[in-house]
Image: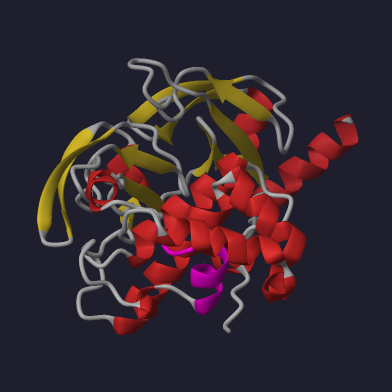
């Protein structure tokens, strides 16, 4: 007689709750369902085992009997009594198979002897609904592509999907498009499409959340005397006033000049500028003399 470890078949522990058993069963039944695995004998065998395991473990009385006797079932009188009682009842079918003329090969010897055969009717089997398979896809974009919302057409499993990409999407972010996955089984809902964004940055800006960071070179004279310079933002150039005696590595925040906040129209992060003061090189004789004069004054 073949003994099957039903807990192992469903991938659950012996202390699993009814909810955990049901969840594991539905996931595996969908994976190995004949509709998704046509002409696959291994999947068909697995599908039978999964249903057999669920038939036992989802029934509190059967589960108790199974837990109590396990592989020593043939030594218990209770099994023989159960078998005799079941023999007088109507025939039932396994899920996914006709109720007439099924053979003992449809079920394991252990199941037949211990529980007297299957108890799933064909009506119950055909009415079981399964959610379609979820699809996963990656979408590769540049940082500039997600600065503004735009539409893009994706092809997933030969189906074209028009997708609106909101401004502010982050690298590694995953969004779900409901119902755009695999088709449901027996009238069940379609699966979902999960899109993971891979965003490359080829700009001078470093992005951290909604804020942008950039380094700006500043000449010695402007850093000492102050003035105005033009700097690049993600959306064009702006004039920036430089305070006299600006020190190296000084940071300036330009409010609202950063990256758009995801799904918050008109809201932006900040642009943080770090000044790198560049010292003059290749000084001529007159410049050296002037610096010496300044040195004496200091």
Answer with the quarter of the image where residue 72 lies: bottom right
Q: Which of 38 and 285 is in front in this view?
A: 38
| Residue 113 is a magenta residue | yes
Q: Is residue 102 above or below residue 251?
A: below
Give percent across and percent down for residue 153: 13, 48
Q: Is residue 45 left or right of residue 248?
A: left
Say which of 206 and 141 sits in front.
141
Residue 6, horizontal then vertical, whole percent: 59, 65
With 207 as the anchor, is 79 left or right in this view?
right
Q: Give the range drawn in magenta.
A: 109-118
Q: Is residue 267 on the magenta stretch? A: no
Q: In this view, does 82 lie above or below 124?
A: below
Q: Residue shown at 72%/38% (left/top)?
A: 248
Q: Which of 74 and 152 is in front in this view?
A: 74
Q: Which residue is drawn at 58% across and 84% down?
A: 1
Is residue 115 at all visible to an observer of this figure? no
Image check: 150 left or right of 45? left
Q: Which residue is at 73% across, 41% downward? A: 290
Magenta segment, principal secondary structure? helix
Q: Is residue 16 visible?
A: yes
Where in the figure is residue 203, as x and y percent of width and height? 41, 50
Q: Is residue 145 above or below residue 116?
A: above
Left or right for 208, reference 132: right
Question: What residue sits 27% from the left and 32% below the top?
Answer: 148
- Closer to us: 206 or 278: 206
For the C terminus, the image quarter is top right
Q: Which colour scheme is used?
A: secondary structure
């Amino acid at each position: 007689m073949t003994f099957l470890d039903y807990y192992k078949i469903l991938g659950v522990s012996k202390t699993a709750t009814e909810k955990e058993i049901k969840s594991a069963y539905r996931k595996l039944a969908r994976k190995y369902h004949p509709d998704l695995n046509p002409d696959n004998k291994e999947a068909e065998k697995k599908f039978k085992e999964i249903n057999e395991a669920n038939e036992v473990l989802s029934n509190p009385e059967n589960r108790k009997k199974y837990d109590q006797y396990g592989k020593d079932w043939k030594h218990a009188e209770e099994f023989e009594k159960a078998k005799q009682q079941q023999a007088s009842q109507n025939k039932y079918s396994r899920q996914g198979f006709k109720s007439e003329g099924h053979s003992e090969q449809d079920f394991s010897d252990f199941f037949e002897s211990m529980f007297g055969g299957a108890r799933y009717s064909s009506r119950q089997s055909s009415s079981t609904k399964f959610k379609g398979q979820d699809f996963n896809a990656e979408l590769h974009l540049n940082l500039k592509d997600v600065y503004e919302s735009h539409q893009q057409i994706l092809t997933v499993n030969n189906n074209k999907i028009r997708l609106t990409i909101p401004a502010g999407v982050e690298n590694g972010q995953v969004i779900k498009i409901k119902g755009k996955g695999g088709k449901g089984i027996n009238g069940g809902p379609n699966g979902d499409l999960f899109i993971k964004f891979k965003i490359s940055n080829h700009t001078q800006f470093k992005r951290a959340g909604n804020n942008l960071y950039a380094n700006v070179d500043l000449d010695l004279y402007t850093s000492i005397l102050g003035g105005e310079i033009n700097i690049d933002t993600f959306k064009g150039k702006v004039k920036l006033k430089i305070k006299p005696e600006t020190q190296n590595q000084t940071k300036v925040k330009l409010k609202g000049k950063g990256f758009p906040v995801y799904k918050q129209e008109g809201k932006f992060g900040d642009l943080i500028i770090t000044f790198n003061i560049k010292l003059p090189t290749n000084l001529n004789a007159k410049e050296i003399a002037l610096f010496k004069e300044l040195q004496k004054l200091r």
